[in-house]
């Protein structure tokens, strides 16, 4: 299955860092958080990525174009017209497709713009700013068993994200924005989606978390895979500092590779 990563937003809540680079390229432990997310998927054998770029997309494209320069020792021999030799070449088993999905496109619109790269098959999707120790093959198996249009990973945190009302059979009865009275499960990303999800995405203005998810939830076609383990987004500078601290401790929960 291919993995779609949303990496095109402005990252306004962490503007201290995103003024320089797009949010998914902000580093944790010297590597972009996008790299950490890709390593999670890759650890489970999912290595075909489609990245939805937008804000400062050139930074993401240049990073992958120069990946060997970032991960290997290099010799530049200026006596040989600047000949470059790569030593201890290290490459990931990745295929990475980088797509310009527009500067101001909403999340649903970005997803729709990469549809042609998905070969008409079910696919994985998550956001470019959150890491977790969720078992992705288990999420896929759960999705296939239930046979619905969409499955998302549900995280129990009291934060400002979409809230899920979940039935006893794990069917999501309602997807809605959080209110001050809510303290239940939230949308943690790490989704499995059928091609049918595109029927609910109109154009670039479609916010994926609004009409598409709200509608499939009302139809009984949105499932929740409940994850009680680690999950953390990098929404603010404080979040970044927390992730850095976990990484530096040598016990980062999402480092499953």
Image: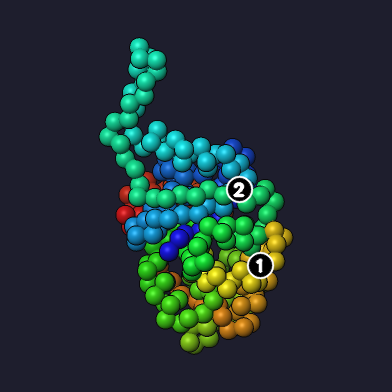
Instruction: Determine the residue positioned at 61% across, 78% down.
Output: 216
Where on the picture, by quarter, is residue 176? bottom right
Secondary structure beneath dot 2 equals strand
Instruction: Determine the residue positioned at 43% across, 64% down.
Output: 1
**Left of 93 or right of it: where is 147?**
right
Distance, label 1 to label 2, CA atoms, is 18 Å
Residue 234 in picture, x, y percent from top left: 52, 53
Residue 30 to residue 152: above or below = above
The furthest residue to the left:
88
Mark 1 or 2, nearer chain start: 2
The furthest residue to the top:
79
The residue at which mark 2 appears reads as: 100
The residue at which mark 1 appears reads as: 201
Instruction: Determine the residue positioned at 39% across, 59% down.
Output: 46
Query: Of residues 34 and 149, which is closer to you in this image?
Result: 149
Secondary structure beneath dot 1 equals loop
Residue 78 to residue 32: above or below = above
**Mark 1 nearby-residue class (10 Å; few <14, some 14–19, many ≥20):** many
Where on the picture, by quarter, is residue 116? bottom right
């Amino acid at each position: 299955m291919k993995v779609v990563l949303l990496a095109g937003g402005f990252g306004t809540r962490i503007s201290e860092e995103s003024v320089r680079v797009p949010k998914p390229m902000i580093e944790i432990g010297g590597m972009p958080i996008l790299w950490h997310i890709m390593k999670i998927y890759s650890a489970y054998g999912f290595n075909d990525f489609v990245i939805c770029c937008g804000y400062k997309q050139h930074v993401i494209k240049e990073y992958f174009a120069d990946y060997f320069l970032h991960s290997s020792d290099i010799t530049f021999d200026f006596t040989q017209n600047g000949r470059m030799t790569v030593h201890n070449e290290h490459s990931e088993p990745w295929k990475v497709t980088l797509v310009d999905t527009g500067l101001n496109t909403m999340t649903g619109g970005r997803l729709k713009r990469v549809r042609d790269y998905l070969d008409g098959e079910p696919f994985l999707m998550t956001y470019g700013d959150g890491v977790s120790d969720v078992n992705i093959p288990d999420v896929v198996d759960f999705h296939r068993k239930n046979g619905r249009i969409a499955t998302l990973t549900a995280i129990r945190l009291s934060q400002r994200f979409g809230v899920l009302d979940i039935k006893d059979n794990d069917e999501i009865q309602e997807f809605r924005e959080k209110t001050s009275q809510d303290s239940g499960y939230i949308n943690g990303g790490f989704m499995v989606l059928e091609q049918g999800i595109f029927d609910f995405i109109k154009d670039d203005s479609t916010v994926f978390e609004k009409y598409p998810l709200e509608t499939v939830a009302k139809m009984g076609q949105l499932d929740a895979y409940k994850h009680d383990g680690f999950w953390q987004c990098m929404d603010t500078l404080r979040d970044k500092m927390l992730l850095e601290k976990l990484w530096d401790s040598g016990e980062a929960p999402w480092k499953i590779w």
